[in-house]
Image (cartoon, rainbow, N blue to C red):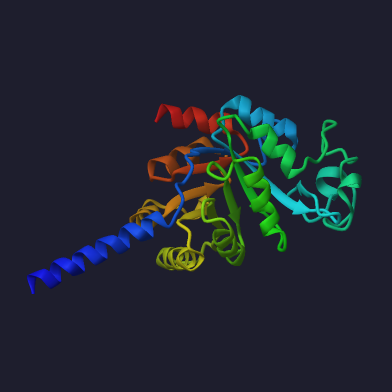
Amino acid sequence: MKQLLTLLLIVLATAVVAAENAFPPVPSAPVVAHRGFSGLKPENTLAAYRAAVEAGANGAECDIRRASDGIIYIMHDGNFKRTAGHDIPAGTIPYTEIAQFDAGEGEKIPTLEEYLALLKGTQTRPIVEVKEDGFEAQVVETIRAFELEHTSVIIDFSAERVKKFRELAPEICVAWLCAFNEETPEDEIAAKIINTLKICNTNVVDMCFNRATPTLVKKLRNAGISVWCWTVDNPNDITRLYEMGVESVTTNYPDRALEIYQKK
């Protein structure tokens, strides 16, 4: 009986280690610049990413879409009107046209390759948010081509795409983006996050900061989940998040968050 119990404990311990080793290391990024240093420069432009690097941000988040000619470019919206002044739906024109648009202060809309090239060799990690279906493999191939697969994080609101990225690239850290209504009970939020991450085979959640609480963060971390939060600019909120154990905050003002994090 004693031998059987010992054998069972060994099997369980092995299973736990195997489960832990199934996830790639989570890159350290306490401060992520939202769309680059977008509080200072036009969002999702190379100028914003240079400013993020210069500020010392640990990560710089971008949003990616694919042009009609297959080139992956960086823009948040599904239309060029707000950031570039052209009322044209995303994905309907080639990048040769997109490259002519002014995204603010004379900055062009960059490609994913230009963004990765800028960050490669710096201490600022690529945080890549995918906004559309259908080019997951191309995203993975591009990140690997720059040899940034071990320092990049892919983030996505689509649980299906998160799962697909984990299957395509087991070595790349992938986070599920999420937000919850104010009426949603905390226990329900915790269960939803834990169950979704289990289905997606990942261990990082990137949630809207306004529903983060000390008890929720503790529950998630006890479940082996790395908790990141977006998008927070108020210094008091940033301080509160770090105090409750949030590992990364995404902000339009990385300089503020860095000052708070370094003090703590």
Q: Residue at x 86, y 47 (%)?
A: 95
In the rendered image, the residue lying farthest to the left is: 2
Q: Position of residue 252 (x, y in %)?
A: 63, 38
Q: Residue at x 48, y 68 (%)?
A: 199
In the depicted structure, whether residue 146 falls above or below residue 10:
above
State the image quarter where residue 41 is shown.
top right
Q: Position of residue 233 (x, y in %)?
A: 57, 39
| Most foreground residue, 24 or 123 | 24
- Asked if one can make out residue 44 in the rendered structure from this viewpoint, the answer is no
Q: Position of residue 157 (x, y in %)?
A: 61, 60
Total tally of numbered discs in the picture: 0
In the rendered image, the residue lying farthest to the top is: 54
The quadrant of the image that shows the C terminus is top left
Q: Is residue 14 left or right of residue 143?
A: left
| Most foreground residue, 181 or 83 | 83
State the image quarter where residue 223 is shown.
bottom left
The quadrant of the image that shows the N terminus is bottom left
Q: Residue at x 58, y 40 (%)?
A: 251
- Asked if one can make out residue 108 in the rendered structure from this viewpoint, the answer is yes
| Most foreground residue, 176 or 82 | 176
Q: Is residue 100 left or right of residue 135?
A: right
In the depicted structure, whether residue 51 falls above or below residue 102:
above
Q: Is residue 15 left or right of residue 128?
A: left
Q: Position of residue 169 (x, y in %)?
A: 56, 56
